[in-house]
Image (cartoon, rainbow, N blue to C red):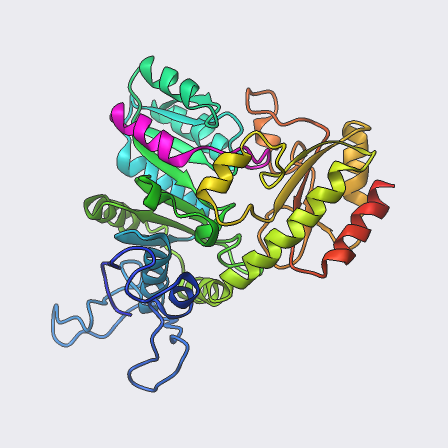
Amino acid sequence: MHSRHNETTGFPGAGGGFETLAIHAGQEPDPVTGAVVPPLYQVSTFKQDGVGGLRGGYEYSRSANPTRDALEECLTALEGGTRSLAFASGMAASDCLVRTVCRPGDRVLIPHDAYGGTFRLFDKVFQGWDLSYDSVPMSDPVAVRAALSEGPATLVWVETPTNPLLSIADIAALAAIAHDAGALLVVDNTFASPYLQQPLALSADVVIHSTTKYLGGHSDVVGGAIVAADADLGERLAFLQNATGSVAGPFDAWLTMRGIRTLGVRMDRHCENARRVADMLVSHPAVAQVYYPGLPSHPGHEAAAKQMRGFGGMVSFRARGGEQHAVDICGRTRLFTLAESLGGVESLIEHPGRMTHASAAGSPLEVPPDLVRLSVGIETGEDLLEDLRQALA
Protein backbone atom coordinates (compact mmCIF):
# COMPACT_ATOMS: atom_id res chain seq x y z
CA MET A 1 0.00 0.00 0.00
CA HIS A 2 2.90 2.38 0.64
CA SER A 3 4.45 1.83 -2.80
CA ARG A 4 5.65 5.23 -3.95
CA HIS A 5 5.97 4.09 -7.56
CA ASN A 6 2.71 2.18 -8.02
CA GLU A 7 4.32 -0.45 -10.24
CA THR A 8 2.44 -3.56 -11.37
CA THR A 9 3.07 -6.36 -13.80
CA GLY A 10 0.31 -5.09 -16.12
CA PHE A 11 -3.30 -6.01 -16.92
CA PRO A 12 -4.72 -8.26 -15.66
CA GLY A 13 -1.61 -8.69 -13.54
CA ALA A 14 -0.53 -11.17 -10.96
CA GLY A 15 -3.52 -10.32 -8.79
CA GLY A 16 -6.02 -12.02 -11.10
CA GLY A 17 -9.03 -10.76 -13.04
CA PHE A 18 -10.35 -7.23 -13.27
CA GLU A 19 -12.90 -7.45 -10.46
CA THR A 20 -10.30 -9.03 -8.17
CA LEU A 21 -7.86 -6.20 -8.86
CA ALA A 22 -10.56 -3.57 -8.33
CA ILE A 23 -11.15 -4.92 -4.82
CA HIS A 24 -7.63 -5.91 -3.80
CA ALA A 25 -4.95 -3.94 -5.71
CA GLY A 26 -3.45 -1.44 -3.28
CA GLN A 27 -6.09 -2.41 -0.73
CA GLU A 28 -4.73 -5.26 1.35
CA PRO A 29 -5.89 -5.43 4.98
CA ASP A 30 -4.16 -2.92 7.25
CA PRO A 31 -1.05 -4.63 8.69
CA VAL A 32 -1.48 -2.97 12.11
CA THR A 33 -5.17 -3.50 12.84
CA GLY A 34 -6.34 -5.98 10.20
CA ALA A 35 -8.95 -3.52 8.90
CA VAL A 36 -10.17 -4.90 5.57
CA VAL A 37 -10.65 -1.39 4.13
CA PRO A 38 -7.54 0.80 3.76
CA PRO A 39 -7.44 3.49 6.46
CA LEU A 40 -8.23 7.09 5.61
CA TYR A 41 -5.02 9.01 6.33
CA GLN A 42 -6.66 12.41 6.72
CA VAL A 43 -3.39 14.08 7.62
CA SER A 44 -1.22 16.86 6.24
CA THR A 45 2.18 15.98 7.70
CA PHE A 46 4.08 13.00 9.14
CA LYS A 47 6.44 12.64 12.11
CA GLN A 48 10.05 12.11 11.12
CA ASP A 49 12.38 9.79 13.04
CA GLY A 50 15.20 12.29 13.11
CA VAL A 51 15.92 14.86 10.41
CA GLY A 52 15.24 13.21 7.04
CA GLY A 53 14.17 9.94 8.66
CA LEU A 54 10.90 9.32 6.88
CA ARG A 55 8.63 6.41 7.82
CA GLY A 56 7.61 4.69 4.61
CA GLY A 57 8.75 7.70 2.58
CA TYR A 58 6.05 10.07 3.88
CA GLU A 59 6.72 13.64 4.94
CA TYR A 60 3.89 15.87 3.60
CA SER A 61 0.61 14.91 1.96
CA ARG A 62 1.08 17.06 -1.13
CA SER A 63 4.09 14.90 -1.99
CA ALA A 64 2.59 11.55 -0.96
CA ASN A 65 -0.20 10.20 1.21
CA PRO A 66 -0.86 6.51 1.97
CA THR A 67 -4.54 6.72 0.97
CA ARG A 68 -3.72 8.39 -2.33
CA ASP A 69 -0.94 5.85 -2.93
CA ALA A 70 -3.44 3.03 -2.47
CA LEU A 71 -5.77 4.54 -5.09
CA GLU A 72 -2.87 5.07 -7.49
CA GLU A 73 -1.69 1.49 -7.07
CA CYS A 74 -5.20 0.27 -7.85
CA LEU A 75 -5.50 2.47 -10.96
CA THR A 76 -2.11 1.28 -12.21
CA ALA A 77 -3.27 -2.32 -11.93
CA LEU A 78 -6.64 -1.69 -13.62
CA GLU A 79 -5.14 0.16 -16.60
CA GLY A 80 -1.99 -1.96 -16.86
CA GLY A 81 0.42 0.96 -16.59
CA THR A 82 3.67 1.58 -14.72
CA ARG A 83 2.69 4.71 -12.79
CA SER A 84 -0.56 6.42 -11.82
CA LEU A 85 -1.21 9.83 -10.31
CA ALA A 86 -4.46 10.94 -8.68
CA PHE A 87 -5.51 14.57 -9.07
CA ALA A 88 -8.04 17.00 -7.66
CA SER A 89 -10.03 16.84 -10.92
CA GLY A 90 -9.87 15.49 -14.44
CA MET A 91 -8.98 18.95 -15.73
CA ALA A 92 -6.09 19.18 -13.25
CA ALA A 93 -4.82 15.87 -14.63
CA SER A 94 -5.12 17.15 -18.21
CA ASP A 95 -3.29 20.36 -17.33
CA CYS A 96 -0.42 18.48 -15.67
CA LEU A 97 -0.05 16.13 -18.62
CA VAL A 98 0.11 18.90 -21.22
CA ARG A 99 2.55 21.03 -19.25
CA THR A 100 4.79 18.04 -18.59
CA VAL A 101 4.99 16.89 -22.21
CA CYS A 102 4.54 20.06 -24.26
CA ARG A 103 6.50 23.29 -24.60
CA PRO A 104 5.53 26.70 -26.08
CA GLY A 105 5.40 26.41 -29.85
CA ASP A 106 4.24 22.78 -29.82
CA ARG A 107 1.13 21.52 -31.59
CA VAL A 108 -1.54 19.09 -30.39
CA LEU A 109 -4.32 17.25 -32.23
CA ILE A 110 -7.66 17.03 -30.37
CA PRO A 111 -10.98 15.41 -31.34
CA HIS A 112 -13.36 17.44 -33.48
CA ASP A 113 -16.05 16.62 -30.89
CA ALA A 114 -13.94 16.83 -27.74
CA TYR A 115 -15.33 17.36 -24.24
CA GLY A 116 -16.08 21.06 -23.73
CA GLY A 117 -13.66 21.40 -20.82
CA THR A 118 -10.84 19.87 -22.85
CA PHE A 119 -11.56 22.24 -25.73
CA ARG A 120 -11.63 25.23 -23.34
CA LEU A 121 -8.27 24.19 -21.87
CA PHE A 122 -6.56 24.14 -25.26
CA ASP A 123 -8.46 27.05 -26.81
CA LYS A 124 -8.58 29.53 -23.93
CA VAL A 125 -5.65 28.56 -21.68
CA PHE A 126 -2.88 26.90 -23.66
CA GLN A 127 -3.11 29.13 -26.73
CA GLY A 128 -1.90 31.88 -24.40
CA TRP A 129 1.07 29.61 -23.73
CA ASP A 130 1.78 29.49 -27.50
CA LEU A 131 0.49 25.92 -27.78
CA SER A 132 -1.51 25.40 -30.97
CA TYR A 133 -4.13 22.76 -31.66
CA ASP A 134 -6.07 21.34 -34.57
CA SER A 135 -9.37 19.51 -34.20
CA VAL A 136 -9.53 16.29 -36.22
CA PRO A 137 -12.15 13.52 -36.57
CA MET A 138 -10.30 10.84 -34.60
CA SER A 139 -12.66 8.17 -35.96
CA ASP A 140 -10.94 8.69 -39.34
CA PRO A 141 -7.33 7.42 -39.24
CA VAL A 142 -6.70 8.86 -42.71
CA ALA A 143 -7.63 12.34 -41.48
CA VAL A 144 -5.34 11.95 -38.46
CA ARG A 145 -2.43 10.85 -40.63
CA ALA A 146 -3.06 13.79 -42.97
CA ALA A 147 -3.11 16.26 -40.06
CA LEU A 148 0.20 14.86 -38.80
CA SER A 149 1.72 15.14 -42.27
CA GLU A 150 0.95 18.88 -42.25
CA GLY A 151 3.34 19.44 -39.37
CA PRO A 152 4.72 17.81 -36.23
CA ALA A 153 2.54 17.27 -33.17
CA THR A 154 3.58 16.42 -29.64
CA LEU A 155 0.30 14.83 -28.59
CA VAL A 156 -2.61 13.12 -30.31
CA TRP A 157 -5.45 13.48 -27.80
CA VAL A 158 -8.24 10.95 -28.19
CA GLU A 159 -11.59 10.39 -26.53
CA THR A 160 -13.33 7.13 -27.31
CA PRO A 161 -16.27 7.16 -26.98
CA THR A 162 -16.36 10.95 -27.33
CA ASN A 163 -18.40 13.35 -25.24
CA PRO A 164 -21.21 13.92 -26.24
CA LEU A 165 -21.45 12.47 -29.78
CA LEU A 166 -20.09 9.04 -28.84
CA SER A 167 -17.84 8.60 -31.85
CA ILE A 168 -15.28 5.81 -31.70
CA ALA A 169 -11.55 5.96 -32.44
CA ASP A 170 -9.53 2.86 -33.28
CA ILE A 171 -6.90 3.13 -30.53
CA ALA A 172 -4.42 0.62 -31.97
CA ALA A 173 -4.56 2.23 -35.42
CA LEU A 174 -4.09 5.75 -34.03
CA ALA A 175 -1.23 4.61 -31.78
CA ALA A 176 0.67 3.36 -34.83
CA ILE A 177 -0.02 6.57 -36.76
CA ALA A 178 0.96 8.82 -33.83
CA HIS A 179 4.15 6.91 -33.11
CA ASP A 180 5.16 6.99 -36.79
CA ALA A 181 4.92 10.79 -36.56
CA GLY A 182 6.82 11.01 -33.27
CA ALA A 183 3.75 11.91 -31.21
CA LEU A 184 2.40 10.43 -27.99
CA LEU A 185 -1.13 9.01 -28.00
CA VAL A 186 -3.26 10.10 -25.04
CA VAL A 187 -6.63 8.42 -24.50
CA ASP A 188 -9.31 9.94 -22.31
CA ASN A 189 -10.87 6.72 -21.03
CA THR A 190 -13.52 8.37 -18.86
CA PHE A 191 -16.58 7.22 -20.81
CA ALA A 192 -15.46 3.60 -21.13
CA SER A 193 -13.71 3.13 -17.76
CA PRO A 194 -10.88 0.57 -17.48
CA TYR A 195 -13.49 -2.16 -17.08
CA LEU A 196 -14.62 -1.78 -20.69
CA GLN A 197 -11.38 -0.67 -22.34
CA GLN A 198 -7.61 -0.73 -21.65
CA PRO A 199 -5.94 1.74 -24.06
CA LEU A 200 -2.39 1.02 -22.85
CA ALA A 201 -2.79 -2.60 -23.96
CA LEU A 202 -3.60 -1.19 -27.42
CA SER A 203 -0.29 0.78 -27.47
CA ALA A 204 -1.54 4.14 -26.17
CA ASP A 205 1.08 6.01 -24.14
CA VAL A 206 -1.10 7.68 -21.53
CA VAL A 207 -4.61 7.21 -20.16
CA ILE A 208 -6.47 10.06 -18.53
CA HIS A 209 -9.62 9.93 -16.42
CA SER A 210 -12.13 12.11 -14.73
CA THR A 211 -12.46 9.75 -11.77
CA THR A 212 -15.52 11.81 -10.83
CA LYS A 213 -17.45 9.74 -13.34
CA TYR A 214 -17.61 5.92 -13.55
CA LEU A 215 -14.60 5.18 -11.34
CA GLY A 216 -16.06 7.05 -8.36
CA GLY A 217 -19.51 6.18 -9.61
CA HIS A 218 -21.69 7.77 -6.93
CA SER A 219 -21.69 11.51 -7.75
CA ASP A 220 -20.09 12.29 -4.41
CA VAL A 221 -16.46 13.08 -5.25
CA VAL A 222 -14.49 15.06 -7.87
CA GLY A 223 -11.14 13.74 -9.05
CA GLY A 224 -8.87 12.90 -11.95
CA ALA A 225 -6.08 10.50 -12.82
CA ILE A 226 -3.23 9.89 -15.24
CA VAL A 227 -1.87 6.40 -15.94
CA ALA A 228 1.42 6.28 -17.86
CA ALA A 229 2.85 3.33 -19.75
CA ASP A 230 6.40 4.67 -19.40
CA ALA A 231 8.01 4.90 -15.95
CA ASP A 232 10.18 7.89 -16.91
CA LEU A 233 7.15 9.87 -18.05
CA GLY A 234 5.46 8.88 -14.80
CA GLU A 235 8.35 10.38 -12.82
CA ARG A 236 8.17 13.62 -14.82
CA LEU A 237 4.43 13.85 -14.23
CA ALA A 238 4.91 13.21 -10.51
CA PHE A 239 7.48 16.01 -10.31
CA LEU A 240 5.12 18.59 -11.83
CA GLN A 241 2.15 17.37 -9.79
CA ASN A 242 4.13 17.82 -6.57
CA ALA A 243 5.53 21.17 -7.72
CA THR A 244 2.10 22.59 -8.53
CA GLY A 245 0.07 20.74 -5.90
CA SER A 246 -2.91 19.54 -7.92
CA VAL A 247 -3.31 16.37 -5.86
CA ALA A 248 -6.37 14.42 -4.77
CA GLY A 249 -7.12 14.85 -1.08
CA PRO A 250 -7.09 11.75 1.13
CA PHE A 251 -10.87 11.58 1.60
CA ASP A 252 -11.46 12.06 -2.13
CA ALA A 253 -9.00 9.24 -2.84
CA TRP A 254 -10.73 7.03 -0.26
CA LEU A 255 -14.18 7.67 -1.76
CA THR A 256 -12.90 6.96 -5.27
CA MET A 257 -11.43 3.63 -4.12
CA ARG A 258 -14.74 2.74 -2.51
CA GLY A 259 -16.45 3.34 -5.82
CA ILE A 260 -13.92 1.34 -7.82
CA ARG A 261 -14.64 -1.82 -5.82
CA THR A 262 -18.04 -2.15 -7.53
CA LEU A 263 -16.99 -0.80 -10.94
CA GLY A 264 -17.40 -4.11 -12.77
CA VAL A 265 -20.92 -4.89 -11.62
CA ARG A 266 -22.02 -1.28 -12.06
CA MET A 267 -20.71 -1.10 -15.61
CA ASP A 268 -22.53 -4.30 -16.53
CA ARG A 269 -25.83 -2.71 -15.47
CA HIS A 270 -25.01 0.67 -17.06
CA CYS A 271 -24.34 -1.10 -20.37
CA GLU A 272 -27.51 -3.21 -20.20
CA ASN A 273 -29.75 -0.25 -19.35
CA ALA A 274 -28.14 1.96 -21.99
CA ARG A 275 -28.68 -0.69 -24.65
CA ARG A 276 -32.37 -0.87 -23.78
CA VAL A 277 -32.67 2.93 -23.83
CA ALA A 278 -30.93 3.18 -27.21
CA ASP A 279 -33.13 0.47 -28.72
CA MET A 280 -36.26 2.29 -27.54
CA LEU A 281 -35.09 5.70 -28.79
CA VAL A 282 -34.21 4.39 -32.26
CA SER A 283 -37.84 3.52 -32.92
CA HIS A 284 -39.41 6.55 -31.20
CA PRO A 285 -41.09 9.05 -33.57
CA ALA A 286 -39.91 12.07 -31.54
CA VAL A 287 -36.25 11.11 -31.99
CA ALA A 288 -34.35 12.02 -35.17
CA GLN A 289 -31.02 10.29 -34.49
CA VAL A 290 -29.47 8.15 -31.74
CA TYR A 291 -25.77 8.05 -30.88
CA TYR A 292 -24.77 4.79 -29.15
CA PRO A 293 -21.83 2.62 -30.23
CA GLY A 294 -23.73 -0.54 -29.32
CA LEU A 295 -26.13 0.02 -32.22
CA PRO A 296 -25.10 -1.93 -35.35
CA SER A 297 -25.96 1.21 -37.35
CA HIS A 298 -23.35 3.26 -35.46
CA PRO A 299 -20.38 3.99 -37.79
CA GLY A 300 -17.93 3.05 -35.02
CA HIS A 301 -19.74 -0.11 -33.93
CA GLU A 302 -17.17 -2.57 -35.29
CA ALA A 303 -14.21 -0.65 -33.83
CA ALA A 304 -15.94 -0.43 -30.46
CA ALA A 305 -16.76 -4.14 -30.48
CA LYS A 306 -13.09 -4.88 -31.23
CA GLN A 307 -11.58 -2.84 -28.39
CA MET A 308 -14.33 -2.71 -25.74
CA ARG A 309 -15.98 -5.43 -23.68
CA GLY A 310 -19.23 -3.43 -23.57
CA PHE A 311 -20.58 -0.26 -25.13
CA GLY A 312 -20.97 1.92 -22.05
CA GLY A 313 -23.73 3.77 -20.28
CA MET A 314 -23.88 7.00 -22.30
CA VAL A 315 -26.53 7.63 -24.96
CA SER A 316 -27.15 10.85 -26.92
CA PHE A 317 -29.98 11.66 -29.28
CA ARG A 318 -31.34 14.50 -31.39
CA ALA A 319 -34.90 15.67 -30.84
CA ARG A 320 -36.97 15.75 -34.00
CA GLY A 321 -38.66 18.98 -32.91
CA GLY A 322 -35.43 21.00 -32.72
CA GLU A 323 -33.63 22.86 -29.96
CA GLN A 324 -36.63 23.89 -27.87
CA HIS A 325 -38.01 20.36 -28.06
CA ALA A 326 -34.68 19.06 -26.73
CA VAL A 327 -34.76 21.57 -23.87
CA ASP A 328 -38.37 20.64 -23.08
CA ILE A 329 -37.50 16.94 -22.93
CA CYS A 330 -34.74 17.70 -20.43
CA GLY A 331 -37.28 19.47 -18.24
CA ARG A 332 -39.93 16.73 -18.31
CA THR A 333 -38.08 13.69 -17.00
CA ARG A 334 -38.70 12.51 -13.44
CA LEU A 335 -36.14 9.76 -12.83
CA PHE A 336 -33.50 11.25 -15.13
CA THR A 337 -32.21 14.21 -13.12
CA LEU A 338 -31.37 17.40 -15.03
CA ALA A 339 -27.69 17.84 -14.17
CA GLU A 340 -24.20 18.01 -15.60
CA SER A 341 -21.62 15.25 -15.08
CA LEU A 342 -22.19 11.54 -15.66
CA GLY A 343 -21.23 8.04 -14.59
CA GLY A 344 -23.08 7.91 -11.28
CA VAL A 345 -25.51 5.21 -10.20
CA GLU A 346 -28.39 7.60 -10.84
CA SER A 347 -29.56 8.56 -14.33
CA LEU A 348 -28.90 12.11 -15.56
CA ILE A 349 -30.10 14.12 -18.53
CA GLU A 350 -28.67 17.34 -19.97
CA HIS A 351 -28.66 19.70 -22.95
CA PRO A 352 -24.98 19.81 -24.02
CA GLY A 353 -25.32 22.94 -26.16
CA ARG A 354 -26.46 25.04 -23.18
CA MET A 355 -24.71 23.11 -20.40
CA THR A 356 -21.52 20.99 -20.59
CA HIS A 357 -20.48 22.14 -24.07
CA ALA A 358 -21.53 25.79 -23.97
CA SER A 359 -17.84 26.79 -24.11
CA ALA A 360 -17.63 25.28 -27.62
CA ALA A 361 -20.44 27.49 -29.01
CA GLY A 362 -19.42 29.24 -32.21
CA SER A 363 -16.36 27.01 -32.66
CA PRO A 364 -15.78 24.05 -34.98
CA LEU A 365 -16.58 21.86 -31.97
CA GLU A 366 -20.07 23.29 -31.44
CA VAL A 367 -22.59 20.51 -30.75
CA PRO A 368 -26.02 20.27 -32.43
CA PRO A 369 -28.57 22.47 -30.65
CA ASP A 370 -31.17 19.69 -30.66
CA LEU A 371 -28.86 17.21 -28.86
CA VAL A 372 -29.79 15.56 -25.55
CA ARG A 373 -27.23 13.56 -23.56
CA LEU A 374 -28.18 10.76 -21.17
CA SER A 375 -26.06 9.19 -18.49
CA VAL A 376 -28.02 5.98 -18.02
CA GLY A 377 -27.84 4.80 -14.41
CA ILE A 378 -28.39 1.44 -12.76
CA GLU A 379 -32.03 1.84 -11.76
CA THR A 380 -34.67 -0.67 -12.89
CA GLY A 381 -34.46 -0.56 -16.67
CA GLU A 382 -38.21 -0.48 -17.33
CA ASP A 383 -38.62 2.53 -15.04
CA LEU A 384 -36.04 4.45 -17.08
CA LEU A 385 -37.76 3.56 -20.35
CA GLU A 386 -41.13 4.68 -19.03
CA ASP A 387 -39.67 7.98 -17.82
CA LEU A 388 -38.21 8.73 -21.24
CA ARG A 389 -41.40 7.73 -23.02
CA GLN A 390 -43.48 10.18 -21.00
CA ALA A 391 -40.88 12.96 -21.49
CA LEU A 392 -40.83 12.38 -25.24
CA ALA A 393 -44.61 12.17 -25.57
Q: In this view, which residue lies farthest toward the top?
A: 150
Q: Where is residue 60 shown, x and y percent of the image?
A: 27, 64
Write the residue at 30% across / 60% down.
13
Q: Is residue 115 visible?
A: no
Write the residue at 61% across / 45% down.
314
Write the residue at 80% across / 31% down.
324
Picture layout, residue 376 above or below residue 52: above
Q: In this view, which residue lies farthest toward the bottom?
A: 33
Bounds of the magenta segment: 162-183
Q: Nearer the viewer, residue 168 or 349?
A: 168
Q: Nearer the viewer, residue 267 or 296?
A: 296
User: Taking 10 as reference, is 392 left or right?
Assistant: right
Q: Quadrant of residue 288?
A: top right
Which quadrant, please, contains the N terminus?
bottom left
Q: Where is residue 162 shown, x and y percent of the image?
A: 53, 36
Q: Is residue 168 magenta?
A: yes
Q: Where is residue 190 shown, x and y percent of the image?
A: 48, 46
Picture layout, residue 141 above or below residue 294: above
Q: Where is residue 49 shown, x and y percent of the image?
A: 15, 77
Q: Is residue 310 magenta?
A: no
Picture layout, residue 23 above or below residue 133: below
